[in-house]
Image: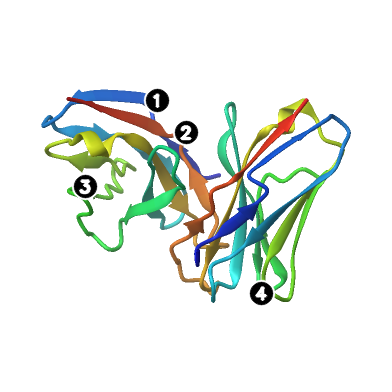
Amino acid sequence: DSGVTQTPKHLITATGQRVTLRCSPRSGDLSVYWYQQSLDQGLQFLIQYYNGEERAKGNILERFSAQQFPDLHSELNLSSLELGDSALYFCASSPLFSGQTYEQYFGPGTRLTVT
Amino acid sequence: AQRVTQPEKLLSVFKGAPVELKCNYSYSGSPELFWYVQYSRQRLQLLLRHISRESIKGFTADLNKGETSFHLKKPFAQEEDSAMYYCALNNNAGNMLTFGGGTRLMVKP
């Protein structure tokens, strides 16, 4: 599959724990975006990385952090988990970031359940 | 602040009927609007974007800056159009997308 991949598909953990979600962008895409989809907040932008550097930040909690590695895959780290963090976390990628708008290609998502 | 509103959570129509999914936005700059679709058990995918002015799968959407709307229309709905539809706005600053709450379209036979 040459599209955006995300692992794991499902994650169940307890409050207070820390998890790492992984995303591999499409081949050649330099930008990676993270979104959170929850029942009450809908689809919300969290953060964007371009070629290893943070480029834009949305409503991302301080307990959450992300990074993009030299091979362009990205990880979203969620710590001190709360029940309200239960959501579907999507990763998307696009070719470039330079003031132009490119289509974002979405991954299948990771469903996080905090118990 | 930018905002995208989709007033209908659920829209149910019969096959062959016209369909219009509403989207309103608020943004102080010059927006770029998109429609994304999510079919059952599939990932979110781009349906169309206003700058391309294309018709995809029979769907069209026109950006109305006066009414700050970007409604999605199709003259004759098909059962395979049943899906979740999200309107999204790009702020042209960081390429981030602001999504509306989504509308579930159900096309009945």
Q: How many marks can you see?
A: 4
Q: Give the residue at x 78% y 25%.
A: A115
Q: What residue is pinned by disc 2?
A: B101
Asked which quadrant contains residue A66, the reply is: bottom right
Chain ID, mark 4? A
Given contact means CB atoms under 8 Å apart, are the residues at marks 2 and 1 in contact? Answer: yes
The image shows residue B67 at horizontal and vertical percentages of: 29, 40
Say left or right for A69 vs B62: right
Q: CA distance from mark 4 to mark 1?
A: 37 Å
Task: Tell me, for residue B59, which label it has, or none.
Answer: 3
Residue B89: x %, y % from top left:
44, 50
SS state under label 3: loop
Q: Quadrant of the C terminus of chain B?
A: top left
Report the amino acid beneath label 2: Gly
| Residue highlighted by disc 1 | B9
Mark 1 surroundings within 10 Å by alpha-carbon count, few (fewer than 14), some (14 through 19), many (20 or more)? few
Q: Is residue B79 above or below residue A46?
A: above
User: Toward the viewer: B48 or A5?
Assistant: A5
Nearer the N terminus, badge 3 or badge 2? Answer: 3
**Do marks 3 and 1 share a subunit?**
yes
Q: Which residue is mark 4?
A: A51
Report the mark closest to the observer, 3 or 2. Answer: 3
Q: Quadrant of residue A29?
A: bottom right
**Position of B92 compared to A57: left or right?**
left
Cα gap from disc 4 to disc 3, whole angstroms: 35 Å
Measured in 3D between alpha carbons, the distance from the residue under mark 3 to the one under mark 1, in whole angstroms, is 19 Å
**Coordinates of residue A56 in the picture (x, y in percent):** 65, 60
For disc 3, the chain is B
Please determine if labels 3 and 2 lie on a single subunit.
yes
Residue positioned 14% across, 33% down in the render: B18
Mark 3 is on which residue type?
Phe
Q: Secondary structure at mark 1?
A: loop
